[in-house]
Image: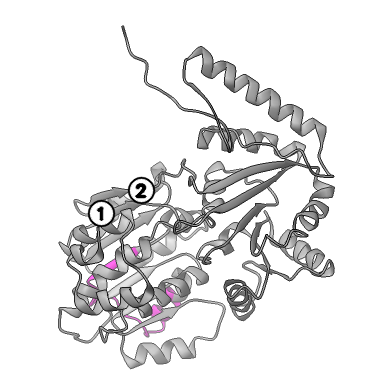
């Protein structure tokens, strides 16, 4: 499949060619024809699947073919500043030959450059909820002329407490519009929100949240909390780890770890919600250009980080929500490149590891050859692995082992 076969117009094809894109990803291949037909879309896709192009290309094409009458025609609502900036960059890259104008608005910075852009006239607006509502209240933004509404990262929106802002914005949208709804997970509250927004939507689902990319090598290091920093410094002595995204649970922990790595001579910066927008953007730019080796991030701040050929992701602290693990390691192993995901697990985090392995349907192999290994953690993991193997054998669903560890899968029972 090529982009030409998706009936995209020449200005978009020319831009895609310059960006080096030749073949659409599964979500692009499925979504673009649906959206070009004017249908609402419910997309279940995790990060790294190419969903930004899946919705931006049809919007650009449909707006290019219509008269550019005054007013904002497309609104893309997204939870974080970094993700908003990234989406804006995509519209700029894909729409460079369309003549369509866009701007990105978000909090944490002065609003004058944003309001100046709005006054200049735009067709496409990428926004975070808080700043959008502020500028609506000030009279800088009207959504009465809207034709397209995209709610991106809906699950993260709810996690960050934006549900009331979303409902306020929905009341301001024209009833007649095309709505695109994207979420990595579909718990009941997300489905309820989607049902309230969409009209007879088509559903596209790719890369289920329980799946981890085959190109990602996963491993776990059993280590106690007080020695995690020493283990990370030990691992980063390996020059083959060119760029690493390290996840911590708290903002304070991210800052502390960045200082520790810097003292050890490892270029590192933290990125989280308490940082100024300029500091966050500087750190992200340096990391993307590979002038910064390690970026320490909290989960919320990491949404929107899309780095070409990111070699390693490290879970310095395991997440207590197993789906978050899948999102984290999905930052590496993209676009056909191999990736490595390393997790540190202390004794108190063993239940989190158990939940993660249950979700992804495989055991994560333990690395024993390191100077900070904790025996208790290894024993517990071995006991759990043995238990799972025995249960799997009893049900005749055990499938041996692969290079990345033992694995099994659930089969529907069949009657003889």
Return the mark for residue 30.
1
The location of residue 110, given as percent across then percent down, is 54, 86
Tell which circle, 2 or 1, labels the residue nearer the N-terminal end.
1
Between 160 and 202, the residue placed more toward the observer is 202
Q: Residue at 38% of width from left, 75% of height from top?
A: 19
Q: Is residue 244 left or right of residue 110?
A: right
Q: CA distance from mark 2 to mark 1?
A: 9 Å
Q: Quadrant of the N terminus?
A: bottom left
Crowding around mark 2 (Cα neighbors within 10 Å: few <14, some 14 to 19, many 20+) is some
Which residue is label 2 attached to?
A: 206
The image shows residue 323 at horizontal and vertical percentages of 52, 44
For the residue pair 306 and 107, the one nearer the viewer reads as 306
Image quadrant in which you'd find residue 178:
bottom left
Query: Is residue 86 in the magenta section?
Result: no
Residue at image location 61% in from the left, 74% down from the top: 280
Residue 167 visible (yes or no) = no
- Whether residue 235 can be seen here: yes
The structure residue drawn at horizontal position 37% and vertical position 85%, both measured from the top left corner, is 140
> Residue at the spot x=40%, y=22% of the render?
411
Residue 225: mark in rendering: none
Crowding near the residue tagged with mark 1, few <14, some 14–19, many ≥20 C-alpha atoms within 10 Å: some
Is residue 342 depicted above or below 130 in this figure?
Answer: above
Tell me the quarter of the picture where residue 277 sits: bottom right
Q: Are marks 2 and 1 in contact (CB under 8 Å)?
A: yes
Q: Which residues are magenta?
A: 132-150
Q: Is residue 281 left or right of residue 208?
A: right
Q: Position of residue 60 (x, y in %)?
A: 26, 75
Q: Secondary structure at mark 2?
A: loop
Vertical position of residue 274 compared to residue 113: above or below: above
């Amino acid at each position: 499949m090529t982009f030409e076969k998706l009936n995209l117009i020449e200005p978009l094809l020319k831009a895609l060619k310059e960006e080096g894109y030749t073949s659409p990803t599964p979500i692009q291949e499925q979504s673009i024809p649906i959206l070009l037909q004017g249908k609402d879309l419910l997309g279940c896709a995790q990060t790294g699947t190419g969903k930004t192009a899946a919705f931006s290309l049809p919007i650009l094409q449909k707006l290019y073919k219509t008269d550019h009458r005054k007013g904002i025609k497309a609104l893309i609502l997204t939870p974080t500043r970094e993700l908003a900036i990234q989406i804006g960059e995509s519209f700029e890259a894909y729409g460079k030959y369309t003549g369509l104008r866009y701007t990105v608005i978000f909090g944490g910075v002065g609003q004058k450059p944003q309001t100046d852009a709005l006054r200049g006239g735009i067709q496409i607006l990428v926004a975070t909820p808080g700043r959008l509502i502020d500028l609506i209240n000030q009279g800088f933004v009207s959504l009465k002329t809207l034709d397209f509404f995209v709610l991106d990262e809906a699950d993260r929106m709810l996690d960050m407490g934006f549900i009331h802002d979303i409902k306020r914005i929905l009341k301001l949208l024209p009833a007649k519009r095309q709505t695109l709804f994207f979420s990595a997970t579909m718990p009941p509250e997300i489905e309820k929100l989607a049902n309230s927004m969409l009209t007879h939507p088509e559903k596209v689902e790719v890369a289920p949240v329980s799946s981890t990319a085959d190109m990602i090598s996963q491993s776990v290091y059993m280590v106690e909390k007080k020695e995690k920093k020493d283990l990370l410094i030990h691992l980063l002595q390996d020059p083959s780890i060119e760029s690493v995204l390290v996840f911590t649970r708290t903002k304070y922990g991210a800052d502390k770890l960045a200082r520790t790595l810097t003292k050890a001579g490892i270029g590192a910066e933290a990125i989280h919600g308490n940082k100024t927008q300029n500091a966050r953007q500087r750190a992200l730019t340096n990391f993307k250009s590979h002038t910064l080796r390690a970026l320490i991030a909290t989960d919320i701040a990491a949404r929107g980080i899309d780095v070409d050929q990111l070699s390693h992701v490290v879970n310095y602290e395991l997440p207590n929500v197993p789906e978050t693990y899948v999102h984290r390691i999905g930052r590496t192993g993209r676009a056909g490149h191999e990736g490595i995901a390393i997790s540190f697990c202390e004794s108190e985090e063993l239940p989190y590891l158990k939940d993660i392995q249950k979700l992804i349907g495989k055991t994560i192999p333990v690395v024993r050859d390191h100077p900070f290994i904790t025996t208790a953690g290894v024993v517990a993991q071995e006991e759990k692995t043995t238990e799972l193997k025995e249960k799997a054998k009893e049900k005749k669903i055990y499938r041996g082992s692969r290079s990345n560890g033992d694995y099994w899968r659930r089969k529907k029972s069949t009657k003889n």
